[in-house]
Image: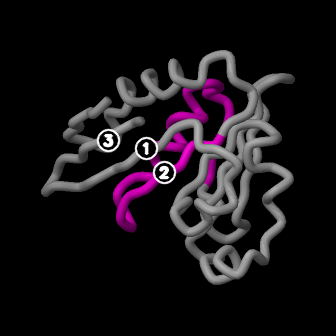
Amino acid sequence: MKFLIQSIDNLSSPIQYLKSKILNLNTGIILFSGEMGSGKTTFIRKFIESYNTDLIANSPTYNIMNQYKISETLIFYHFDLFRIKSSILSGDHEFDDIWGKMGISLIEWGEFAVDYFPYITSTVSITVDNLSRTIEII
């Protein structure tokens, strides 16, 4: 499904669609792709906060992973793999115990590690065209 949005702050429709795709799942892998600054982190932040407005979702750029416990059965693991591309490509990482086995992994720059995922639940691609964005969720 494709969504054309004029503002990165207007994400309610694509977020609701993604939520419907993972309804009743407690494990999964969702890959986010798009150029630097396209809105991957903003989408994930708003997605997580749509479950609990008291949560403050931050970018895991420097600590690589943030964990958000929504309920006893729903935990999100937000990864930003950009800074550790070389470690991922060499297989030097410790995330195999999480990816696809614990909670739902929301992974920015997942194309660096696609060979390490046991499966992919969904992909979210964000492209920027002037002031609008196209968000495609598969």
In the rendering, at what x and y percent does residue 64 appear?
Answer: 70, 65
From mark 2 to mark 1, how far is it between C-alphas? 5 Å
Q: Could you classify mark 1 by the number of other residues whose Cα lies within 10 Å: few (under 14), some (14-19), or many (20 or more)?
A: many
From mark 3 to mark 2, how far is it between C-alphas? 10 Å
Q: Nearer the viewer, residue 20 or 45?
A: 20
Q: Which quadrant does the C terminus fall into?
A: top left
**Picture layout, residue 11 above or below residue 108:** above
What residue type is disc 1 on?
Val
The residue pinned by badge 2 equals 32
What residue type is disc 3 on?
Ile
What color scheme is it?
one colour
The residue pinned by badge 1 equals 124
Q: Residue, x 47% and y 43% (percent of image)? A: 123
Q: Could you classify mark 2 by the number of other residues whose Cα lies within 10 Å: few (under 14), some (14-19), or many (20 or more)?
A: many
Q: Are marks 2 and 1 in contact (CB under 8 Å)?
A: yes
Magenta part of the protein: which range? 29-58
Q: Nearer the viewer, residue 34 or 130?
A: 34
**Picture layout, residue 26 above or below residue 103:** above
- Can you tell which mark lies on residue 135? 3
Q: Residue, x 35% and y 24% (percent of image)? A: 13
Disc 2, SS: strand
